[in-house]
Image (cartoon, grey):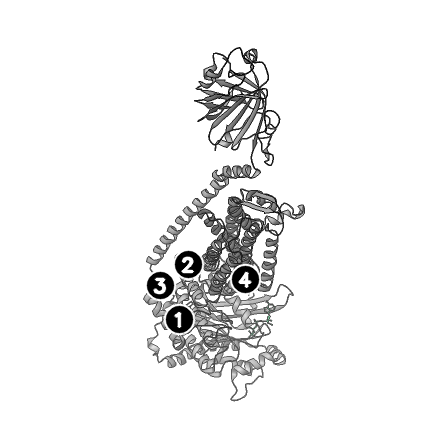
Amino acid sequence: TTTTTTTVTATVTGAPTATPPPLCIPEYDCSSNPKKPQAFYNSFMSCAVNAPELTGFFPGNYTLNLDLDVKNTTVYAQLWLGQSEQFFCKAPACTLTTVNDNGVIKTKWDCPTLTCTCIEPTVMCGGIPGPVITLGATINALKGPFSLTCPQGSNECDFFIGDLDGFFPTGLKMVDCDLGECIFPSEIDDSISNVDKKALSPGIIACLAILGLLILALIVVCSVAKRRQLVLSRTPYTLNTEAASLEFRNVGYTLNKDGLEILKGISGSAPAGAVLAVMGPSGAGKSTLVDILAGKNKGGKVSGQILLNGKQVHLSEIRRAVGYVDQEDTLPATQTVYEAVLFSAMMRLPEAMPIYRVHERVAEVIEMLGLTHCSNRRIGNVTTRGISGGEKRRVSIALELITRPPILILDEPTSGLDSHSAHMVVEQLCKLAQSKTTTVILTIHQPRSDIFAMFDHTLVVSKGEALYFGATNTAAAYFNRRGLVCPTNYNIADYLLDIAMDQELVAKAKSFTESGDEKVARATGAQTHANGNALARRGVNGVNNSEITRTSSEASNERAYETSVPMEEFESNSSTASLSESAPPGKKKKTIYPTSFLTQLRTIMKRNFQTLIRDRSLLVLHLAVAIVLGVFIGGLYFKVGMDLAGFQNRAGSLFFMMALLGFSSISALGAFTEVRTLYIKERSNGYYPPMPFVISTLLFDLIPLRIVPSLLMGCISYWMIGLNSTITTFFKFLLILVLFNVATAMFCLVIAAGVRKTGVASLASSIAMLFMMLFGGFLINSKQIPKALTWIQYLSMFKYGFEALAVNEIATSKLIDNIQGVAFNVPGSLILQKLFGFDLTGYWQSMIILVGLNVVMIVVFWWFVSYRLKERK
Ligand SMILES: Nc1ncnc2c1ncn2[C@@H]1O[C@H](COP(=O)(O)OP(=O)(O)OP(=O)(O)O)[C@@H](O)[C@H]1O
């Protein structure tokens, strides 16, 4: 603006107050900024005129007063001789320039025209006392041009009138100039803020550039993802048709914290297409063993070897080959059984599989596990009753069965099931194994004898040690030989458990030395038993022996089975290879997901949307609270004025809105904690990587629960309170409200992802929120905070939110009040600076910081979800 170019050169000492008469009205403050003399609106100048040509004719002291009107680019002048004004002039349409005259910077006013009026009767205009000459006609006839040149750093200027160049060829010298401008301090602030508002600072330009780059990156990522989806959807696929064998040698597990040995060198194997049951009393170490076999992350020290199809491979390969059903059911409460299984299918079946085939497979698995009757029922949880515990167990199995993994490991698949359902589930698992597509390893507590008879192999674990590993049908004979005879009509499975629980019997069994013939008998018995079981199962299925086609892989699996070594030999074959992730055998395989990123994102978003709609309490509460409180705040602060109380209410209403939104963000903690366990389980089972989960979680938390409610509250209360009615101010207000609410929600999400304990997380976020509020600029003046604590305010999202809202609302308004006869006319900008300690440029600065904080917190949230939220058993 023109104001910046009016840097004048004279020392700023305020407007003249002696002769000639003062130009300042006393209650006005005069601008005096010696560092940067600047005319804002009207600058007044008073100089002595050094013109010997004039004093020769009209002796006396000349004073030239100039009014430099920056806004209208007009110069007004008065020439005084002693105490008497001689004439006055007006020079409109001037141009203001700064010139460099041999290194001296000069401010120059050039005015093309000039009109002057001589005041009669005066000395110069033919008045008293009788002059030698009169200049009245000449002065009245002046046309211009007119120019005024003031070098910087000097209190002298040159004054030149075109028509008088005959009289004063070098112009008139103005000396001892005083310069000042009489304005309200508020006008200075407004003027400054106007200048800053219009300028696009480098910071803003950089942010806009970053935003542009982000959008560009997003477009690139989306198109790459779309391409990948297309490629995957056209890739020919085959579902697994071959079971894999799993052999484990000397598996040990020791807790880190107290060195407790949970597993003591357990060995065994599950040949391809066989069913291995791990049995033992509670606390024997069954779950620990199957966790290790499934390649799960364990907190303690794992030792031993696992061979997949006879080969030592990296744990990541084992994880890929294994489908794992945990002991605890972690299921999406709001989904129906069908939807939950479909979710697993959509995530884990090949992208290229036609959707109708996916649905067929889902229906097939649901039927296989006897879930058809409840397939459209919601799963539920402790607060909302859904399907029964047994049904949940079967849904958990269905989620893994859907992919037909080469190896299926199940931890207590029959717990919570009645004997009929348990029989049915085990029978289905045996059928699966028999079809040679899946090897089944399961832990089981106390199977019924008919269920026990269906297992090919049994591993009995007692206090972390293998008591028996071999064919199921030779178990009774094995213990018979050790003098542990199963009573007649007694369930052998129960008897095995009785032995495993009684340490005397365990010692007795261990003291017996097995002969070489017996070892072979146990191994070969295992083979015949396997065949026998298969036959029994075929009888169940009604499938003819001849119908089973033996593939070459099956034959080789069987060979592997024949050469499987008995327990003692396994133990002597001890290996030093560690099963820990730090020194894994084989090469780590990158996790390859069968579906593309876009399909994963779409599937998770669909489930999140259904959850949001079905479990509406949180959504409804947020929206209702936003509307009700919006009306409440609007009513409480209805139509605030511009007086002192009005200003207090303005600031108060803004801060209260922020406090409400900030504290309502704590709900993000609970909401995320609920989905966290499900995410950890699904990620561990290879459903999807962290990124689609992060995106979907953020979208479904931030948009409906943070952005929409803050917009609602803002729209309602803004107009009711009667805040600044310009439309840009309103949208800027909404923008900050949304950014602030997103930032506080992100803060809570980061805490929820980083702190595992819900109690600690909610305490930490509440206290942090309170502190951020305290340092938000409303409860304590930011310039008055003790020095040692000033840094805290920069961590406060409340500070940035409130500063931006306050600057947006108050900077351009004026406090007008009258207290006991004392008139107040204080600009908002001054209140912001003095009352809150805020910068006038605070809006964009705070907005950019809020955007930056949000970006940082999103990255931290993603990092926590990717690297901290991992299954650790
Ligand atoms: N991280 C751990 N911290 C403390 N103890 C542990 C840990 N992991 C396993 N244990 C202990 O190891 C033993 C074996 O646990 P595990 O869960 O494997 O038993 P289990 O045979 O599966 O029992 P159940 O049939 O009751 O599930 C238990 O005594 C258990 O308390």
Q: Horizontal and vertical percent for residue 652?
A: 56, 53
At a point 55% along the width and 83% down the height, the residue shown is: 480
Q: Earlier in the sequence, mark 2 or mark 1?
A: 1
The nearer-to-camera label among 2 and 4 is: 2
Camera-side residue: 152 or 158? 158
Q: Which residue is mark 3?
A: 238
- Residue 463: which quarter of the image? bottom right
Residue contact between numbered discs 4 and 1, judged by CB atoms under 8 Å: no
Q: Residue at x 58, y 78 (%)?
A: 500
Evaluate if marks 3 and 2 touch, with contact meaning CB atoms under 8 Å apart: no
Say whether disc 4 or disc 1 marks the residue closer to the N-terminus: 1
Residue placed under numbered mark 4 in the picture: 579
List x then y, in percent, for residue 31.
58, 33
Do the numbered discs 3 and 1 sit on residues whose CB atoms are within 8 Å?
A: no
Secondary-structure class at tag 2: helix
Dot 3 or dot 4, earlier in sequence = 3
Ligand 1 shows up in the quarter that is bottom right
Residue at 42% x, 76% y is 430
Residue 601 marker: 2
Query: Sequence-wise, which precedes: disc 2 or disc 4?
Result: 4
**Residue at mark 2 to residue at mark 4: CA–CA distance:** 33 Å
Mark number, residue 338: 1
Q: Quadrant of residue 153?
A: top right
Q: CA distance from mark 2 to mark 1?
A: 19 Å
Amino acid at dot 3: Thr
The residue that appears at 36% across and 57% down in the rendered structure is 232
Q: Position of residue 86 (x, y in %)?
A: 53, 20
Disc 3 or 2, which lies upstream in sequence? 3
33 left or right of 166 in image: right
Q: Nearer the viewer, mark 3 or mark 4?
A: 3
